[in-house]
Image (cartoon, rainbow, N blue to C red):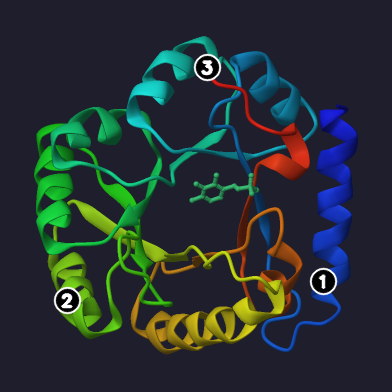
């Protein structure tokens, strides 16, 4: 498993997919390396290969790994966040991508205020309406974004979506497109609203073609996940 080689291959894949883009063809696209269930050594390899952004799913795992990671890198929380883990999450992460309820937004805002921090967040949308999956449903979206816009210690940076595991990956395309449309509607009224996080190892090319500007790639760069 050559992490640097894999990282470069995914970067090349992103540039290929950019050729099929209709929206914002020259936009900066961030390759976020998903490091969950990989040790600190693998994270260092990815960062040394050029990764600027990493993603973790669990607060506890990040708390164990981040102190040993002396590299300068932007840290994203991409997994579901429970309210009892909010304070350590605000301490550990530059961006919380999994904000999906007013209840959670209230807790993050409060924790950020107590730590004198403005916390960058993305709203996670359950665009496919999958039961049991995280993410706000579109009918609840307006109430949530209004809350986040007004919250003093939250800065809304954009949107996040996890596509379902469709039998045919092409089925993701309309969902990615729908998210980009929503993103472009919301962007003009906001100052720092710049991140649309969607696409993983199996579908990142389709996501990029449809307007993702953050792709979250784990397996294609670091290989299959160990249990740590
Ligand atoms: C694990 C995970 C990824 C990465 O998935 P791969 O298929 O390994 O690329 C991306 N996003 C989220 C939210 C994840 O939990």
Is 159 drawn above or below residue 19 in the view shown?
A: above
Q: CA distance from mark 3 to mark 2?
A: 39 Å
Identify the residue under disc 3. 228
Is 125 drawn above or below residue 82 in the view shown?
A: below
Q: Tell whether circle 1 marks a residue whose Cβ is less than 8 angstroms from ligand 1.
A: no
Precedes in sequence: disc 1 or disc 3: 1
SS at mark 3 in the image? loop
Residue placed most toward the observer, 88 or 94:
88
Q: Give the numbered dot on residue 146.
A: 2
Q: Is 123 placed left or right of 218 in the picture? A: left
Identify the residue under disc 1. 17
Precedes in sequence: disc 3 or disc 2: 2
SS at mark 1 in the image? helix
User: Looking at the image, which residue is at 52% across and 67% down?
Assistant: 164
User: Looking at the image, which residue is at 52% across and 10% down?
Assistant: 68
Q: Quadrant of residue 114?
A: top left
Q: Quadrant of residue 4?
A: top right
Which one is in front in this view, the residue at disc 1 or the one at disc 2? 1
Q: Give the numbered dot on residue 72.
A: none
């Amino acid at each position: 498993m050559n992490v640097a080689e894999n990282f470069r291959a995914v970067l090349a894949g992103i540039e290929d997919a950019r050729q099929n883009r209709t929206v914002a063809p020259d936009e900066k696209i961030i390759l976020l390396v998903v490091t969950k269930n990989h040790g600190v050594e693998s994270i260092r390899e990815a960062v040394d290969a050029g990764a600027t952004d990493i993603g973790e799913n669990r607060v506890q795992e990040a708390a164990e790994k981040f102190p040993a990671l002396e590299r300068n890198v932007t840290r994203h929380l991409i997994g579901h966040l429970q309210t009892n883990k909010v304070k350590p999450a605000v301490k550990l992460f530059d961006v919380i991508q999994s904000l999906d309820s007013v209840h959670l937004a209230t807790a993050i805002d409060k924790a950020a205020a107590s730590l004198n921090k403005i916390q960058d967040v993305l709203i996670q949308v359950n665009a496919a309406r999958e039961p049991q999956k995280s993410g706000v449903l579109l009918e609840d979206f307006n109430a949530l974004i209004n809350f986040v816009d007004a919250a003093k210690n939250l800065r809304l940076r954009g949107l996040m979506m996890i596509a379902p595991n469709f039998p045919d990956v092409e089925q993701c395309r309309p969902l990615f497109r729908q998210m980009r449309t929503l993103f472009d509607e919301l962007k003009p009224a906001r100052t720092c609203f710049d991140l649309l996080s969607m696409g993983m190892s199996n579908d990142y090319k389709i996501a990029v073609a449809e307007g993702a500007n953050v792709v979250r790639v784990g397996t294609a760069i670091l290989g299959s996940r160990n249990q740590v």
